[in-house]
Image (cartoon, grey):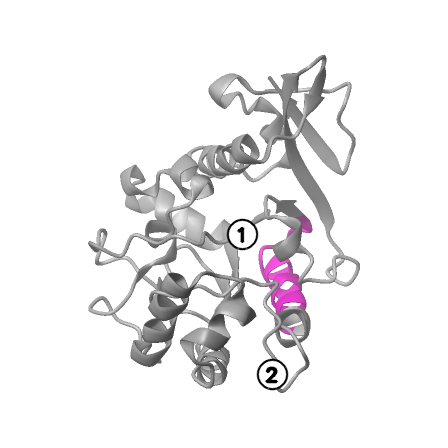
Amino acid sequence: MITILSPAKTLKMDKVVNASLYTKPIFIREASSLIKGLLKYSPEELVGLMKINSKLAEQNFMRHITWEKEHDLFNSKQALLAYDGAVFKGINADDLNQQQLSFANKHLIIFSGLYGVLRPLDLIQPHRLEMGTKLKNKQGNNLYDFWGNKLTIYIKKQLKIQDDNTLIDLASKEYSSVIDMDKINARVIKPVFKDYKNGTHKVITIYTKRARGLMSRFIIKNNISLPSDLKEFNEEGYSYNEYLSSDAEFIFTR
């Protein structure tokens, strides 16, 4: 069973923890190629390309200049420990032990606009490149063209290696749509988290992001390998709603 996640826009690169436990990004050559493409853009041009303000554009312009192909513990940090959005606050990786981090590295995959796919312990350098960015490249006009076939093949291969055909989709649509779900020959299950509001259960984005992190943490801490075991998830008031669920969607409500 493999679980996929989206990355976060924010990073915490201040300190390295679990320094002895890390891996290197698989598609580092491709990431380097994208950085070379980004170096052609001035801060002013990055504002339009990345749909960000001038302060963030200047920050990312400097990141592109200082980015190095060789990743080590002096210039990088493990992805699961570096990302700092709501999903990753829910995972709270800082207190996971080595066994749990090793399990995560085998069963959790973070999609990335820059790195393609990241295992939790893969080293990353400061960056911000969303999958929806329309960055022209040798494969096409956007990052879906650049990554789509590569990541579909990679996910299919990983499922085969694990002798499993179940993919747990905890990623946003922006990221999960980069792969062709029909070609990976897998059972895809999407956990959906809904809160009761104004007389009905609704998806509320800010709560959903945290819940995806909590679900990921639940999988990691309990070494979950069977999809049916996901139904036991009950963090922060959520519980499996059999009435609303289907084979493709596991609905959790509170």
Q: Residue at x 45, y 59 (%)?
A: 119
Q: Nearer the viewer, mark 1 or mark 2?
A: 2
Q: Is residue 154 on the magenta stretch?
A: yes
Residue found 34% across the figure and 42% down from its top: 93
Residue situated in front as seen by the camera: 205 or 83: 205
Query: Please, what is the three-letter code of the amino acid marked with disc 1?
Result: Ser
Spot occupied by residue 243 in the image (x, y as percentages of width and height)? 77, 18
Which residue is identified by label 1? 6
Q: Is residue 132 above or below residue 247?
A: below
Query: Label 1 vs label 2: CA separation?
Result: 22 Å
At which x and y percent is residue 110? 50, 55
Q: Position of residue 129 (x, y in %)?
A: 49, 66
Dot 1: element: loop
Q: In the image, is residue 181 above or below residue 150?
A: above
In this view, the residue in front, 1 or 118, is 118
Q: Tell me which amino acid carries mark 2.
A: Asn
Q: Is residue 187 above or below residue 211?
A: below
| Residue position marked by numbered label 2 in the rendering | 137
Boundaries of the magenta span: 150-166
Q: Residue at x 52, y 16 (%)?
A: 237
Q: Residues within 10 Å of mark 2 (few under 14, many from 20)?
A: some
